[in-house]
Structure formats: structure tokens, C-alpha cells
């Protein structure tokens, strides 16, 4: 069952250091662009993942094609994709050993969430960390 309690979500956000953002955009008018900047401004390392802009730099980070290319441990995979594309991203998150998957506002896939949970990942669905961080008073200090 996806995390829904404020305490569980606060703990996940407070403990996280590295977030892989699948669907990160280089366009300032896109929500993923703004959320990436917000998260970076709150001390998270956000690694952008987008096959359309692979090899570019976004927010000071190299843009990767997929999660398999990342060599660093991932605390949260933040998914900025349509609900029908979530299953593949979740399977990739499981394969690379991510600790959690976070489906953005409007993004829901119960079957993918169940697979992630069965593999031991925490799941947040239909929420935005840029809303929850200030709402929950999450204070992070960059490592």
C-alpha cells in the first residue's frame, strides 16, 4: 500500500539524499523543471533521466538515458511520466535497487506500485514532493 501518512512521507523525504527524476525537462515551463530546481534548492542531488536530452546537462547534472546508466545509489525515483509509462520505470527502479518510487500528481499505477512494494521499495503515488516538503516542514541538510 502506498505511503499516505504525513509521518511516513516526511521520513522518506528527510532520509533521502539522491533522487533520480525520470521525465526531467530542460524546458522552464514544465513542472518537472521547476520541481527539479526546487529539490536541488532543498539539498537533494537530483539526477535527470530523459532519453530525449541524454548527454546534456540540467541543473548542473548530466542527463542519463535510463536508470541503468546511473552508477550511484538512488533513494527515490521521481516519476514525471504518464500513468501508462510507469510500469516500465518501476521495473527499472526495482532492477537498479532504488529505495522508493514517487509518482507525481495525477500519476497512478496500482499494479506497478504493488510490484515495487513486493520488491521492498516504498511507494508514493499521486503526490508532489515540492508540495509535501513545505507542507510537512521537511528540513534537509545537504550531505
Image: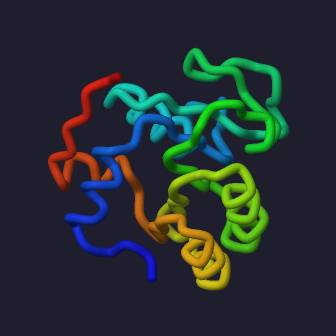
What colour scheme was applied to this rendering of the protein? rainbow
Q: Position of residue 75 (x, y in %)?
A: 50, 46
Figure check: 79 above or below 120? above
Figure check: 10 above or below 53? below
Residue at far left of view? 137
Look at the image and tell me in which quarter the C terminus lies. top left
Res 140 quadrant in image: top left
Q: Position of residue 97 (x, y in %)?
A: 64, 52
Q: Position of residue 72 (x, y in %)?
A: 63, 32
Point 20% across, 64% down: residue: 7
Point 22% across, 66% down: residue: 6
Figure check: 23 above or below 101? above
Q: Position of residue 42 (x, y in %)?
A: 32, 30
Q: Is residue 45 left or right of residue 22?
A: left
**Which of the two residues, 69 or 85, is positioned nearer the viewer here?**
69
**Which of the two residues, 123 or 130, is positioned nearer the viewer here?**
123
**Which of the two residues, 118 or 27, is positioned nearer the viewer here?**
118
Point 51% across, 58% down: residue: 100
Amino acid at each position: 500500500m502506498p505511503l499516505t501518512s504525513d509521518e511516513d512521507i516526511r521520513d522518506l523525504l528527510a532520509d533521502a539524499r539522491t533522487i533520480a527524476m525520470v521525465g526531467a525537462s530542460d524546458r522552464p515551463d514544465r513542472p518537472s523543471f521547476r520541481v527539479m530546481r526546487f529539490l536541488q534548492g532543498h539539498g537533494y542531488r537530483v539526477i535527470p533521466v530523459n532519453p530525449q536530452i541524454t548527454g546534456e546537462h540540467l541543473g548542473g547534472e548530466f542527463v542519463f538515458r535510463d536508470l541503468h546508466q546511473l552508477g550511484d545509489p538512488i533513494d527515490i525515483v521521481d516519476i514525471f511520466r504518464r500513468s501508462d509509462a510507469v510500469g516500465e520505470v518501476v521495473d527499472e527502479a526495482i532492477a537498479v535497487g532504488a529505495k522508493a518510487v514517487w509518482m507525481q500528481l495525477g500519476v497512478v499505477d496500482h499494479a506497478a506500485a504493488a510490484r515495487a512494494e513486493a520488491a521492498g521499495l516504498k511507494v508514493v503515488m499521486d503526490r508532489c514532493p515540492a508540495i509535501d516538503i513545505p507542507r510537512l516542514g521537511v528540513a534537509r541538510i545537504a550531505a
